Every structure is written in structure tokens, then in C-alpha cells.
Image (cartoon, rainbow, N blue to C red):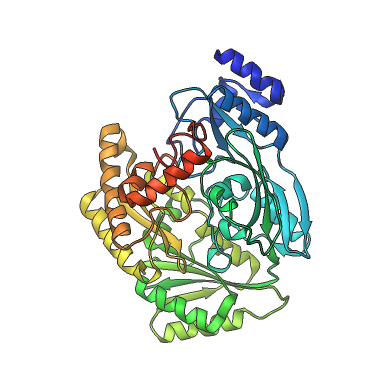
Amino acid sequence: MTNQSLVEGLDAIVGPDHLVTPGPDQEPYLTDWRGRYHGQALAVVKPGSTAEVAAVMEFCAQHRVAVVPQGGNTGMCGAATPMQAGPAVVVRLDRLRRILEVNPVANTITVQAGCILAEIQAAAAAVGRLFPLSLGAEGSCQIGGNIATNAGGTAVLRYGPTRDLVMGLEVVLPDGQVFDGLRALRKDNTGYDLKQLFIGAEGTLGLITAAVLKLVPAVRSSATAMVALYDMAKALDLLALLRTELGDRLGSLELMSREQVEVIAEHVPHVTIPFPLTTPFFLIIETVDAMAEVDLRTPLETALGQALEAGLIEDALVASSTAQAHALWKVRHSVSEGSKAAGYVVSHDSAVPLGQQGAFVEAVERGIKAAVPEARVVMHGHIGDGNIHVLGILPHGLVADPVEKDRLVGLINAVVDDETARLRGAISAEHGIGISNAGRLARVTDAVEMNLMRRVKHALDPAGLMNPGKIFG
């Protein structure tokens, strides 16, 4: 079948207004957010219903055309970019953007996969509830992509990653069949929990079209602080103290290295840094409660006073207003923008056992500086869940030669991956594998584990048409 005939077949399913063929209009769908990968596609299709998605998938399966699911295209690893050699169809769910049901009694929200994360947050807030997934791209990322990558964000400490927030899924399988697991059940012990196969699978096993998500009571009281830290060991001691003094009111604990904050200060306008940059690390702390007018500031100040007396922190600023709290969070939410502007970013998403975070940070910083002295090493992450993002930022001039770029990236990756594996950690905690990390995954993952994943992939997608080249390379 010719490419023209394939395009005509897709046109018959979704209509000409919802199909983008090669040309300038298709370009935004062919490049990842960081500008690292650029592919090509036979067409970009935008189905308007689950039935149309199923028809597109069945058509592509019949004609052995690869399918690349794409959400808001905000990912960090190239998982939504069509990079295979043969013809491929990018499937966007922008038209599947309805909030299907909000149930404050059951604390659930049922949504189509094309919904923007911020829209889901707003729908939950309208009925006094919170959908707690929160990340920098929430104004443009789609929930289908969040689920497909098991997104983490800044509220994992209290609420868990996306996996913990999904109750049910509707998924179109590679052959066009629809898995209807769109159930809002708190308890269901009827065999395998099949929805878990698709969470974090990056569209390699099927295409998520709808989800039932968990809601929690809305946050009606909060207190936010930023502290200057001496080192990672003391950060973990501070975590223990805060958990003792604040209990489950501790919502977020976000770490940034001094070098990371310097990068933000240099490259992101209108961000105010509230401290002199004299300590190695800085931490944003947020406490939350579902009850209105609860005084969270006093217990937070008391706990931080204890931390000062114990020598765990050098200084602390507790926000005195909502505007000041937002300004503190603005610093944390600017890490990607600042780092991207500073140079070519070699980004990592490692998770290690909580007690090993200090050893991990020291070892990788020392190792990267020894292997690539030109690299600027910055870090940010989530104290409490073991996830530290280590970034090696290279001057753009140093990576102008692709061969030299690959060599330097390989040196930095080896340092981080080897230390992650030594500590029995994971090379990706929340960003996924995609294209960027496929080779790294194969290098550090146990052969039995890799084989099991390949067997699952083959069972659901024997022709290898779903998002080829991702995860397995």
C-alpha cells in the first residue's frame, strides 16, 4: 500500500481537518521539548473518540504502520518523538479532552486522556477536592502522557507518583481492541491488575484514552519555607525531624544545590533568591492541611527552630503570605528553564535508597568533575522519595562536534549510572526511558528483568508497532 493510500485511509477515519501531513504544520509534533530529537511521520492524526482511536490502531496494525502516541509533548526523554525508519503515525488525543465525571463522594474524577493536567486540577478544585499531581509542565502536559510515563512531580512525598493516583484505565490495544478497565473501585482482587501494565509503559503496549483518578480533600491551609542546608546527611536528619514534628502534614520537600540555584538566578528573569548562596543546598518545605484556618506556620517555625539549634540548617525563611510562598516555589519550578538556557544538559533521574542519597550525591559530583572537568554539575530533587536529578551542563561550544558530544555524554552517564546501580537504585524515577535512556537501561538492568519486559511487550504487541525504539532501543 502506498503512503498516499495510507494517508487516505486515515483521512477516512478522522477526517481531513484532523489529519496533518508532512510539511510546516507537522513540525511541532516531530521534535521533542528539549529539541534533542527530530523524526518524521506519515501523518499526525487527532481522533475524536475512543472508537476512532480504535479504528486508527486497527488500520495501522493491518498495514503494519508504527504508532507513536503523543500527549502534550513535554517529556524529557524523547518518548513521544517518531524516530523509526519506516512510516509512522503520531496519534494525538487533543480532541479527547472532556472531564467525564467528578464524584466528590467517591473522591474520583473520570477524564479523557487528552485533558490538560491543570484542567483536571481545576475541575477537582471546583468541588473542594485536589488532584495532587503537580509539575512544572502542568499547563500543557496531558494526563494520558502523565500516566504513560508515571509522572512524579513535587507532591510525591505525601501522595505518591501517578501510579498511586490511577484507579482505572481505558486503553486501545495495538490491534484496535479496547481494554475497558475504567472502573472506580477501591477494592478489586479479580486476577491481575492489568492497568498497571500501561502505567509507565510510555505507549509501548497500548494507547491510554481515559482514566479514573483519585482525588483527595482540597488543601485549605498551608505553610511554606525555604532553608539553607549544610549537606545531604543533615537534609535527611531534617526530614526525620519534620516527620516527627509535623506528621502527615508534611507535603513537599524539594532540594536544590547551590549551583542549581545559581543557574536559575543567571538565566531566569523575575526569580528572587531569598538567601545569599553560601551553603551547598537549599530546601523548600511545604506543609498542608485539609482543614481551613489551621495554623501550620507556628509548628513549622517551631520545627525549624529545633533544626537551627541542632545545627541541621544555617538559615530559614517561612513565607508570610501566599505571594511569598509562590515566589519560593517559582525558584523550584524554574530549574528546567534555567538549566536549558545554561548549556547542553545531560540530565539524570536516579532514585536510590533514602539513606544513600548523601553518598550518591557526593560520589556522582566527584566522579563527573573528574571525568569531565568542563561540566557544571547541578542537582535538584525530592527529599523523601530518594529521587535526585543530577545534571551535567556542558558549554554549547563543547558539544558542537556530535562525536565529542556523545563521548562526553557517555562519560557523565557512566558515572551516574554506575553509582546508581552500585546502590541498587533505578536510573529513572519519574521521567521514563524513551530514546534517551534506552541504552543506559540495557546496560545496568538485570538480564532476567529485561527479558521479562520484552516478553510482556511481545505478548501485547507482537508486531512491534507501538512506539518502536522506545525503552528497548
Residue found at x 41% / y 73% = 235
Give percent across and percent down for residue 160. 55, 63
Viewer-closest of 388 and 429: 429
Residue 266 showing in the rendered view:
yes
Q: Position of residue 380 (x, y in %)?
A: 43, 59
Nearer the observer, 191 or 327: 191
Q: Is residue 214 above or below residue 20?
A: below
- Which image quarter holds the N terminus? top right
Q: Is residue 31 left or right of residue 194?
A: left
The residue sitting at the left extreme is 370
Q: Quadrant of residue 270?
A: bottom right
Q: Of all residues shown, which one is farthest toward the front? A: 191
Residue 347 in sight from this viewpoint: no
Q: Left or right: where does residue 357 sit relative to residue 53? A: left
**Residue 358's quadrant in the figure?**
bottom left
Q: From this view, report whether residue 242 is shown above or below residue 165.
A: below
User: Residue at (34%, 69%) from the top-left corner?
Assistant: 356
Using the image as rendered, state which of residue 460 and residue 397 is in the foreground: 460
In this rendering, position of residue 406 left or right of residue 108: left
The quarter in which the C terminus is drawn is top left
At x 60% / y 18%, what residue is drawn? 6
Give the total of numbered labels.
0
| Residue 299 pos. (x, y %) | 58, 83
* Residue 371 image point, x, y percent: 22, 50
Q: Is residue 419 left or right of residue 289?
A: left
